[in-house]
Image: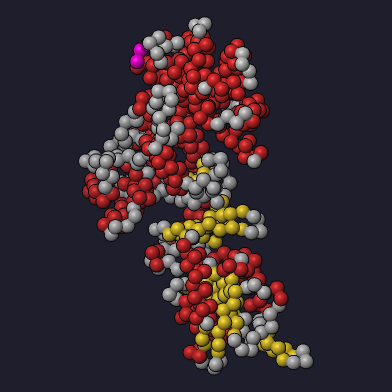
Amino acid sequence: MEVQHYKPTIFVASSQENLKIAECLKEQVREFAEVVSWQDASAKHGEILFEHIKQLPHIYDFYISIFGPDREINHEQYTHLTSENVVFEFGLFTGTVGTERSFIALPTTDKPKLGADLRGVTYISYSLTDPNDRESVQFSSDDIRQLEDRVQQFRSNITIGSQTTVRIGEDKHLKRRFVEKRFIASNGAERFAQSVLAGMRVSNLPNFAAIYRASLEVKERPYFHMPYFACGSLAGEIRKQITISSTADVNVLPPRPRAIMHWLEVRKYIYKIGKATTSAHSIGHIDVNLKPSNIFLDEKCEPFLTPRVRLDFVGGAEVVNTLHDASKAALNGEDVKLRLEDIVYNAPECFSTNYNHGRDFAQADVYRLGILAFHMLTGRLPSVFYNISPEEENLTAIINHILKVKTSAFADPPHLDGEALGIPDSICRVFEGMTRSRKDERYQTVKDALHELKHVEERIFVHVEESLSRCRKRDDFLLSFYGNFRNAIGPLRMKELFRTDEFADQAKKLDDALEVSVQFIHDYLSQIDFERAQKFSDVARYHAGMKIDGSEYELFSDSLICTICDGDHPFDPECACERKRETIRAEWRLFLGLVVSYFKSESQQYNLQQG
């Protein structure tokens, strides 16, 4: 079955006597749906029938129960009844998928007696003039049209990929939403099922999405259910940040260098995803398929990897075959953005037919994690190939070039300009060390890369403390900081924030805020669980009560950095040197970014709880 011709599926339940009605229904709806009858979906040999029936509502999209006159009973007069099995299956389906996707097919004559509980269910009427002639079955055109409308509406909420469909569903019993990913391509279902089975082992690891339910039956379109993530995927977040950065207003203070995503956010994602990847490696899963479209964000923007993983790493001839398929798709005018993501997120050695699965997988994931950092900071996928213009991003040219020269096509990704992005050069060097085209020049494992990143952060905090110590040697430092912040936020808001007109009280509270910031980072680097620290949570709630918004945190940060680094005679004498000034400014930006992001997040969460 070709993916672009995907049709929702309808399961038709009936008694043995009414199978001819189900066959006729297939002819009526084959233009917009695929119909599977009870006979087509019978249980396998040795399988418990009830266990098989329980799975059916999760495999098929719609359900039609044919309530034909299967038998007669005499209670003073003859009454037609439907088979008990058909009624039972209808209740099972309706309780799972709801009445919106459950229908009852009723004959226009000899209608069976229906219980009062079935009122409100949608009926499809049919006439049968000759029980022995299938050609005599006629369905109501209006009812079939109503069924088609429901099917088309259901299909419009499905995203169709190269091999799978994705839809959002709701478990009414557990009161939770879920995402269903179902395999629908013509081949490869067995491999998909194996990857879901492997994913069940990682779904209980930190920062992996859980698997709520799964079916691994290859002939019945294997699928799995995972949580619905309110904030979508990391790919969507990157696109959103690109849009925001392109329309951002100029700040009151001198404009500061900006990455597409704040360094703090990038650091959080790299750490969380990196640790999840290391955990998967430790239990033998060597391909977690790192890329933004496979990383999901919950309401707190906490990242979770898709639980579908492989037991073997994709590399060598398989990657080359994928490139051939992608090249054909590009020439056919298909949307190939996700295919480009698949290509760039493969390490150079993956394109070699000599790829060693057991030895090379760890370094390949280091490369992917580095590309992810580059993507989040710059908002674009790096063009890491010789003779290909980064501006063109011509997929066909890139694919054909790789196919021609294999791994020699790769160069190191472009240099990350720390000064332009507002990131210390030492941080940029860590990311660049993750994306070296030669794997012997790259970090050996994800754990090594994360350890180096942590070490760099600790050194930066030492530099910030030293910078603050130099500034405090001047008596007028706090006064200047207070003046810059007051000018930025305005005198009326200043009075409202500090609840006092006294200059000394306002200045003292501003100094206290600075001390809280220093203590916060100290606890963070000491690996104290600062997210649950009562002290900082209380401060965040106090800020929420004062209705401090994110921009005021930013003004605090910008005012302090301006006081320390700018002017003809900056308070940190090291900033007299332009090169050192940019480094110190970037280190303060990182330091304060951790503080600002935490308090913004905690205040917003507190407001939601109160709201």
Q: Is residue 575 magenta?
A: yes
Q: Quadrant of residue 101?
A: bottom right
Q: Is residue 584 magenta?
A: no
- Could you tell me residue 484's position as x and y percent? 48, 17
Q: Specify whether residue 70 is in view.
A: no
- Quarter of the figure that contains the N terminus: bottom left
The residue lying toward the viewer, choosing from 365 and 549, is 549
Q: Specify whether residue 378 is in view.
A: yes
| Colour scheme of the rendered structure | secondary structure
- Total label count? 0
The residue lying toward the viewer, choosing from 279 and 469, is 469
- Could you tell me residue 22's position as x and y percent? 53, 81
- Could you tell me residue 283's position as x and y percent? 52, 44
Name the residue: 45% across, 32% down: 262
Q: Is residue 243 above or below residue 564?
A: below
Name the residue: 51% across, 55% down: 196
Q: Is residue 566 above or below residue 376?
A: above
Left or right: 222, with 582 as reference point:
right
Bounds of the magenta segment: 574-578
Name the residue: 59% across, 71% down: 102
Q: Is residue 157 above or below residue 562?
A: below
* Dominant SS type (magenta): helix
Q: Residue extending furthest front?
A: 492
- Quarter of the figure that contains the C terminus: top right
Left or right: 581, with 541 as reference point:
left
